[in-house]
Amino acid sequence: MGNIKMVEGGVTAAKGFLAAGGSAGIKKNGSADMALIYSDTPCVSSGTFTTNRVKAAPVIWDKIQVESGEKAQAVVVNSGVANACTGKEGMRYCLETAETAAKAFGIGTNSVLVASTGVIGQQIPIEKIKAGITSLNETLDGGIEGGIKAAKAIMTTDTVSKEAAVAVTFSDGQTATIGGCCKGSGMIHPNMCTMLAFIGTDAAICKDMLQKALSSVVPDTFNMVSVDGDTSTNDTCLLLANGLAGNREIVSEDEDFDLFRQGLLDVCTRLAKMMAKDGEGATCLFEVKVIHADTKENARTLARSVVSSTLTKAAIAGHDANWGRILCALGYSGVAFDPDKVDLSFESAAGKIQILEGGVSTGYSEAFATEILSCDEITATVDMKMGDAKAEAWGCDLTHEYVNINADYRS
């Protein structure tokens, strides 16, 4: 009988994965701006990417590599410059980055994936990237510290690094680890949200099942996060599996696949919530749970509509239980429902209060509602009374600081 448990670490938690992070001189303030992730053995790879029609050069590069079936072994990531809207030169820099890493690691060029995050429209300082690969290669670390350094190096406006890992015990008794890191704080909105995520696992799993697992969890995790309504040009989530756990290879949607998928769902959910809570200028995590919807997709649509509402996010920032904004956001979501049946409640560490019953106010205490909405993690639960489907979405409040951050992002 399999089981799943949380463990310490991030992208280096699984066997055979090493990482490093440091400064290559890309950012003006001299902070860490480059990371390497490396597997001792070649990995089957899977990925999901931005739905924005404007795709950064690294997104195009990685899509080609992942879809080709070529095994991957290294990922080179930089922050500070997005390598988006950079034309043929941007693609050439992806190739030069991969060639430099391939030479450093003694692997094929097509085994190298690349990712960038930062300012759109600027060309990558390729000589700094090349030098960074050489220097970081000497500091690769398979311990927890290596993962931490990589997670910190990919940050842009993030205020904290983001890591999560789980151990999954399969039906044959073998245990595999799934661990990852991500960055994301602004320009975040489905599908996918503005983010980079890198997940490594030592599970033995074929490419088709790996991609199926990732594609099945992204809609309920990373695609349920919204900070500001802007979908990035660079969104990339890569999942690499090197098979070193020694479990019976997962080649079909059996019990072990379900266990692996649940472990991956746990990791991605934790990372998604960390991104939402660390939204630019945010003071709290705002979680929206839609229950008793008629279909899963409608539940997702309703939850995303509320968590993405600018007016609702502003009300949360002001600790104001302005339920009319939530009902309004449900109403323009495009989902058909009866407003006279909707219940709404708010909950946090301070307690729980029902705001709406059957579409009308309960005459709740404004003072208690404000107390609940003054905590750093707030949940709004919306009962649609239509069926058995449910979904969760995550966002944050909208504060003056969000404008301050983005008004001078390039400087």
Image (cartoon, helix red, strand yellow):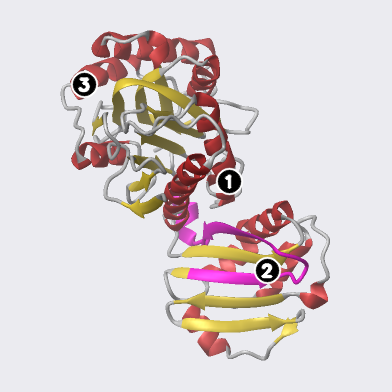
Label 1 or label 3, whichever comes before in sequence order: 3
The answer to the question of whether label 1 and label 3 lie on touching residues, with beta carbons closer than 8 A, is no
The percent position of residue 173, horizontal first and vertical second, equals 34, 43
Residue at x 37% of width, y 34% of height = 247
Secondary structure under the numbered disc 1 in the rendered image:
helix
Residue at x 79% of width, y 57% of height = 335
Residue at x 74% of width, y 74% of height = 342
> Residue 185, relative to residue 248: is it above or below?
below
Residue at x 58% of width, y 51% of height = 224
* Segment colored magenta: 378-405
The answer to the question of whether label 2 and label 1 lie on touching residues, with beta carbons closer than 8 A, is no
**Residue ID for mark 2:** 326
Horizontally, is 312 left or right of 27 in the view? right
The percent position of residue 22, horizontal first and vertical second, equals 23, 32
Label 2 or label 1, whichever comes before in sequence order: 1
* Residue 327 seen by the camera: yes
**Residue ID for mark 1:** 223
The percent position of residue 239, horizontal first and vertical second, equals 44, 32
Placement of the C terminus among the 4 image quadrants: top left
Find residue 137 and name its label.
Answer: 3
